[in-house]
Amino acid sequence: MTFTLALPKKVDADLAADVEKQAPYASPHVRRLRVNADRASVEVELEEGADAAEVRGKVERYLTTMVSKYRALDRKELYRHERRDRAPYATGVYAELKRRGWVVELGRGQVALAGPALNCYRAVDDMCVALGHSRFGASDEIYPTLIPTDILGRCGYFTSFPHTVSMVTHLVEDFDLIEEFRQANAKAPPLTVPRREALVTPEACLSPAVCYHCYQAIEGRTLAERGHVVTSVGRCFRYESKNITGLDRLWDFTMREIIFVGTEAMVTARRLEAIEAAKAQMELRDLDCTIEGANDPFFSAAYATKTYYQVRSDLKYELRLAVEPGADGEARSIASASFNLHENFFGKTFTITAADGQPAFTGCAAWGIERWVLAAFTQHGFEAARWPEPLRAQIFG
Amino acid sequence: MSSELEARVRQVVVRVAKLPPEKQEVPPEADLFRDLGVESTAALDLLLSLEEEFNVSIPDDKFGDARTVRSLAALVGALIT
């Protein structure tokens, strides 16, 4: 079943893409929402058996909140690289990676990597680590996969991105409730939770990003002139609902970050340097890409206001790698790295003082590594000879 | 630029940013976001409220550069004359 809804106002391409992407969070009964070509209405496709009136109400509220206050801004394109290799993109790349056993699906949005796909993953991470060490003098740190809920709360995560958070709960310490759970799950899956009250309110979440840990780790500190530069890699978790697909949009993925904390001048300069370094990485690895202004996937009322500030203030740039076109033949790219400034938000939140006596500025460069694997095999294919050095030797030996 | 215009801009800032009484003086050269702690989420509301209050259309790039009451008043003043 489908129905059409008029949008509160006409939308631009950026908002149209985000409206489509966040639509699964309006209702579990929304199978798909597409912005029509007129950009003034949407087509909503429902799951079987859905209560159309109820879903329509939720989708209308969702659209009103996302669209009404939105103010379009031009996104800057800082860089564009076109491959020297003019061979066509590989198609069905994810299926081929699975067929070869280089990617194994272990759950929704959860994969194992092996063989050349794992080599590619390591090569990308090595590239970022080398950049962090040689260019920025970053020190290595390793953080937990869990992050306390109060830390995420202080970082504003629950107001900005509540739809993607993955919370960790456990059974309450109560013999009867645990025993009831044990007996209910004595047979084969699926998991049965006899009583919701047997689950505690989560005190931890799965980390959605690496850098929050870094800021928490230096809470209350005053930094030296050189600031604080760290590189770290971690598993990150963002619940992507019906958008979970292939290596493009995993629930459980790997993020490598280089994190800058210091004065405004230092952090601003380091982010620019990271963008310049990323350009050099692209030249060497010969991947079709752009670096352009972007916004985070803020939810609901936070979307218009935070997107406006972020884009207007040039706080976020994304490196987008081209991948194979969608089913409709439209060119597609995926955000595979981002270069972010947070101004002094985390400096204030965690009382970190820069050498100039002001709340520290922070910024980071972050790479989503599995997406690089997908884009690299899409653009360079499965024949080793087509891959540029140094990737070829790293991946195929 | 008239101090009256600055005062009207200041009133809009105080209302939109919901500034507590001790911050409502708003020095004209203070950076609203960095010095006064105005939430970034208030920027769009501030822009829309200034446009409504002064019946002007404010270019986004110029609004982005105007981060103080004084510079906002100058921006609005240039648009209404």
Image: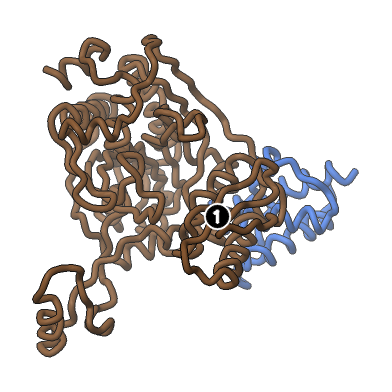
Residue A247 lies, with reference to residue A92, above or below; the image says below
Q: Quadrant of residue A397?
A: top left
Q: Which chain is brown?
A: A
Residue A236 visible in the shown view? no
Q: In the figure, is residue A86 to the left or right of A120?
A: right
Q: Residue at x 17, y 42 (%)?
A: A112
Which amino acid lies under the numbered mark 1 shown in the image of this protein?
Tyr
Q: Nearer the viewer, residue A217 or A180?
A: A180
Q: Which quadrant holds residue A54?
A: bottom right
Q: Residue at x 39, y 16 (%)?
A: A88
Residue B10 sits above or below residue A74 on the image: below
Up the image or down, B13 lies above or below A111; here it is: below
Q: Secondary structure at mark 1?
A: helix
Please provide percent x and percent y for residue B63: 69, 44
| Colour option used | by chain
Viewed as shown, does residue A118 lie left or right of B42?
left
Q: Pick the quarter of the image with the N terminus of chain A.
A: bottom right
Task: Say few, some or many: other residues with alpha carbon within 10 Å of mark 1 (under 14 / 14 to 19 / 20 or more).
Answer: many
Q: Chain of mark 1?
A: A
Which residue matches tag 1?
A303
The picture places residue B32, in percent across and down from the top left corner, at: 61, 54
Q: Position of residue A95 (x, y in %)?
A: 27, 34
> What colour denotes chain B?
blue
- Report if residue A241 is visible in the image: yes
